[in-house]
Image: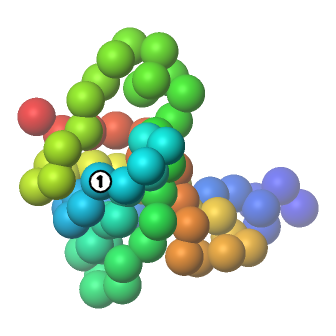
Amino acid sequence: MANKEEALEVEGVVTQALANTRFRVRLDSGPEVMAHVAGRMRKHFIRIVPGDRVKVELSPYDLTKGRITYRER
C-alpha cells in the first residue's frame, strides 16, 4: 500500500525562479512543473538558480507539483 503513495523521482532543469523559493522546472521527459525547495536544502542554504540540473520528487496525486531534493554541481 505504501508503494502506491511513493513520490516519483525525476530529473530536470530549472527554467525560472519564482517567489517563496518556488521554481519552474522543465523535466527531462518534457512537461514543466512547479517545485519548491525541500526543507533540508533550505537548512543548508543550497542556492538554486535557473539553469541548474535538479532532482524533483513529484506527488503521485498531482503531477504538476513537486519538491526539489537535490541540485547537481
Front residue of this view, candidates 17 and 30: 17
Left or right of 53: which side holds 60?
right
- Residue 55 in view: yes
Residue 14 location, x and y as percent?
Answer: 24, 58
What residue is shown at x 47% (from left), y 57% (from top)? Answer: 35
Image coordinates for residue 71, horizontal then vertical, percent = 26, 39
- Residue hosting label 1: 17
The percent position of residue 39, horizontal first and vertical second, equals: 55, 27
Q: Name the residue at the front extreme.
A: 19
Q: Residue at x 89, y 61 (%)?
A: 1
Is 34 rendered above or below residue 22? below
Number of marks present in the image shown:
1
**In the figure, residue 32 lies in which quadrant?**
bottom left
State the residue lying farthest toward the top.
44
Image height of 48 relative to 10, above or below: above
Above/below status of 1 relative to 26: above
Residue 23 position in % (x across, y down): 37, 56
Amino acid at the residue labelled 1: Ala
Q: Is residue 12 visible?
A: no
At a point 30% along the width and 82% down the height, the residue shown is: 29
Q: Considering the numbered disc 1 on the image, is that residue within a helix, a strand or a loop?
A: strand
Mark 1: few, some, or many residues within 10 Å (few <14, many ≥20)?
some
Q: How is the image coloured?
A: rainbow
> Which quarter of the figure is the C terminus placed in?
top left
The residue furthest right is 1
Q: Write the residue at 24% across / 39% down.
A: 48
